[in-house]
Every structure is written in structure tokens, then in C-alpha cells.
Image (spheres, helix red, strand yellow):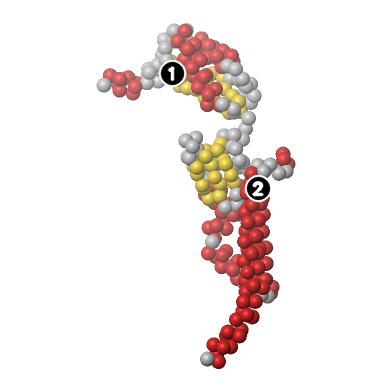
Amino acid sequence: MNKILKNINNLPNFIEQILITVIPAIAIFIVGTIIARYLRQRLKQSKFGGRHVDETLRPVIASFVFYTIMAATLYAVLIKLGVPPTSLIAVFGAAGLAVALGLKDTLSNIAAGVMLLFLRPLSVGETVDMEGVIGTIDEIDLFSTTLNTPDGLYLYIPNSIIWNNRIQNFSRHASRRATINIRIGYENDLESVQALLTNILLQTPDMLSVPETPKVYITSFENTAVHISCRCWLPRQDWAKRVSDLHIDIKKTLDKADINMSIPAIALSQNDM
């Protein structure tokens, strides 16, 4: 009975300690979390820094601000709960070591993310091919890279996978080379066909002469056809459409000149069946 009475007498002190320490600590944590999330979202969506801040860096800066505020919030909460600063340093050191050992894959993603941001093999808005995965970069942060595929799919790829594999960037240069291979029969005059195809390339809108003027080469001979390669440089914008239009122009011009494009032997055998 004496212990019960003693605990009842200490109840006001206990409630007072809760009001002084625990509730303010919870409030600090809630307010810190709200501020961190709000600033992260605002920094991602805003255009702070204008042209001076690269679009690729904004998500990284937003993540850095978020984790910095959360770390400061956690520190303030523990201090409010009465944990000595020296003990916090020891706890954070031990926790950091445990996290480093347990999350080595995550740390490798961070290291890869830093290298991607430093060397810039890809940037937000660029279209890339990463080991057969083609898409447009949507965001690069310290842990992962997200992109949208031509089919409208959302892909989330850890940075370490990107860093350890080949990256083919379709958007980095202002121009790309187009190579169109065709086959014609032996009855055609090769020099005339070569001149005709060269003229088509030269008359194509927005055709580039740098780094190389359009060229047409006779590349090889088969039993039933001569192989011709048309090579030219086109602007990167709408590249696929430009190449498609060039195919159409070549086909129409060859038809008008009564130059028949040879059908591969395998196609003939399949049609006969």
C-alpha cells in the first residue's frame, strides 16, 4: 500500500516530465518531418537557380536538404529527451558503422550516384540505352535513376547497375549518322544509281555536311544483288521521322527511274511457299 501511495504521489511529477520532455520531442519530430518533406517537394518542383542550376542536380539538392533536416530533427529530439551530446556522438558513430556494414549495396548506389552526377554520362531529359533498356531520364538522385520508356513505362534502376554497365546516349550530340542499306539487281548501271542516290541525299531537307557530306558506297556483291550503303548526317531532333522520310524518298525515286530493288533470296523462298 505504501508503494502504491508513493507512486500516486509521484504521478504529478511523472506527468510533468512527460509534458516537459516527451510531448515537445514529439512535436519537434513532427514539425521537422513536415518541413523536410515540404522543402524536398518544393525544391524538386521549383526552378530555383534558373539556368545556373542543372535540372539533374535539383533532385539531389532536394534529397540532401531533406536528410540534413531529418538528421538535425533527430538530434534535437534526442537532446530534448535528455540524451547527453557525447553519448549521441558515440551512438551515431556506432550506428553509422552498423549501417555501413549492413547497407553496403545502398552505399555503392550512393557512390555510383555521385560519379554519375560528377562525370555526367547522362542528364535529365536525355534518351539513353542501358543494356537494352531504352528510355528518357526523368530523375537522378543519390540512390537511383528513374526513366520513362517509349511504351510509357516507369523504370526505377539502382545507380550501381547503371554505373557498372554500358550507357549509350542518343541525345548528347546535335547530329546522328543515318545508314540506309539497299539491294539492287545487276542489270542496273551502278554509277548512275550511285549518282541518283547521292542527289537524293543532298536534296533532303536539313541534311548536314558536317562531320561528313552524304556518301553512297557500293559495299558488296551477292549472287542475286548488289549491296549499296547510303550514309549521311541528320539533326538529332525527330531523327527517326527524318530517316523514315528518307527511306520513302529513296523508294519513290528508284521506282520512277525503273530501278528495281532486289528481293533477298530467303524472302523469295518464303513467298514461294
In this rendering, the answer to whether 224 lies above or below 38 is above
x, y percent for residue 76: 67, 67
- Residue 42: numbered disc: 2
Task: Please give the residue where the numbered disc 1 appears in the rendered image.
Answer: 183
**Which callout, 1 or 2, points at the residue further toward the start of the chain?**
2
- Left or right of 17 in this view: 197: left
Q: Nearer the viewer, residue 229 or 56?
A: 56
Occupied quadrant, residue 216: top right
Q: Nearer the viewer, residue 259 or 63?
A: 63
The kind of residue tagged 1 is Arg
The kind of residue tagged 2 is Arg
x, y percent for residue 106: 55, 57
Q: Residue at x 61, y 85 (%)?
A: 9
**Is the residue marked by circle 1 packed among few (<14), some (14-19), or many (20+) residues within 10 Å?**
many
x, y percent for residue 57: 66, 46
* Numbered disc in front, either 1 or 2: 2
Q: CA distance from mark 1 to mark 2?
A: 57 Å
- Left or right of 201 in this view: 49: right
Q: Residue furthest top?
A: 257
SS at mark 2 in the image:
helix
x, y percent for residue 207: 60, 20
Q: Residue furthest left?
A: 273
Q: Residue furthest bottom?
A: 2
In this rendering, the answer to whether 70 lies above or below 152 is below
SS at mark 1 in the image:
strand
Q: Residue at x 58, y 84 (%)?
A: 8
Q: Residue at x 62, y 74 (%)?
A: 18
